[in-house]
Image: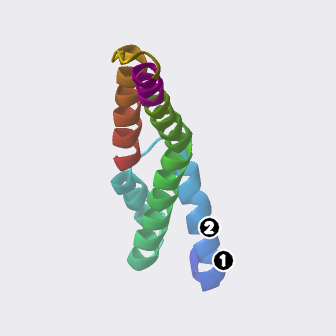
Amino acid sequence: MTEKEELTPEELKKMAYSMGMRLKNQGLDGETIYARLEKQGIPEDMAKEVVHDILTERKRDVIKQAEPVYNFALIRIGIGLAVGLLTYLLTNIVILPIAIIAGGVVAALMAKKKMEE
């Protein structure tokens, strides 16, 4: 009997997640992680579950990092529009702070694209 056959299903799952996280931290993609897990004797369905969970966690981490940037970009757009509205109301001249608004739009689009990857 090999060592993997002696492991309980819970221990095997724990080992699979540990190996999967180690491979994820090395920057490997899902297919490579799946192949390596199978090569180590992890059952196919368990390897698929581990890879799915790891990729979901990776996406959650990316969203968590990009969300503050996205929110700040939306605030910049709002501030630019508020300044434009105030200058119009106070002086009857439309002055839009294009740099603030454009910078906010670009930052929001880049953050949104990163969140959708």
Identify the residue shown where x is 55% and y is 48%. 64
Identify the residue shown where x is 43% and y is 25%. 89
Identify the residue shown where x is 44% and y is 70%. 47
Q: CA–CA distance between discs 2 and 1?
A: 6 Å
Element carrying mark 2: helix
Compared with 71, 93 (above or below) is above
Q: Residue 79, which numbered label?
A: none
Q: Position of residue 62 (x, y in %)?
A: 49, 45
Q: Amino acid type of disc 1? A: Glu
Q: Position of residue 33 (x, y in %)?
A: 43, 55
Compared with 25, 95 (above or below) is above
- Evaluate if marks 2 and 1 touch, with contact meaning CB atoms under 8 Å apart: yes
- Disc 2 packing (10 Å; few <14; some 14–19; many ≥20): some
Q: Which residues are magenta?
A: 80-89
Instruction: Say whether residue 3 is visible.
Output: no
Element carrying mark 1: helix
Colour pattern of the rendering: rainbow
Q: Residue 10 vs residue 35: left or right?
A: right
| Quadrant in the rendering for residue 81 | top left
Q: Residue 15, which numbered label?
A: 2
Q: Residue 26 vs residue 94: left or right?
A: right
Compared with 59, 94 (above or below) is above
Q: Which residue in the protein does label 1 denote?
A: 11
Q: Nearer the viewer, residue 83 or 67?
A: 83
The quadrant of the picture occupied by the N terminus is: bottom right
The majority secondary structure of the magenta stretch comes to: helix
Q: Amino acid type of disc 2? A: Met
Identify the residue shown where x is 33% and y is 40%. 113
Instruction: Say whether residue 29 is visible.
Output: yes
107 inside magenta stretch: no
Compared with 67, 109 (above or below) is above
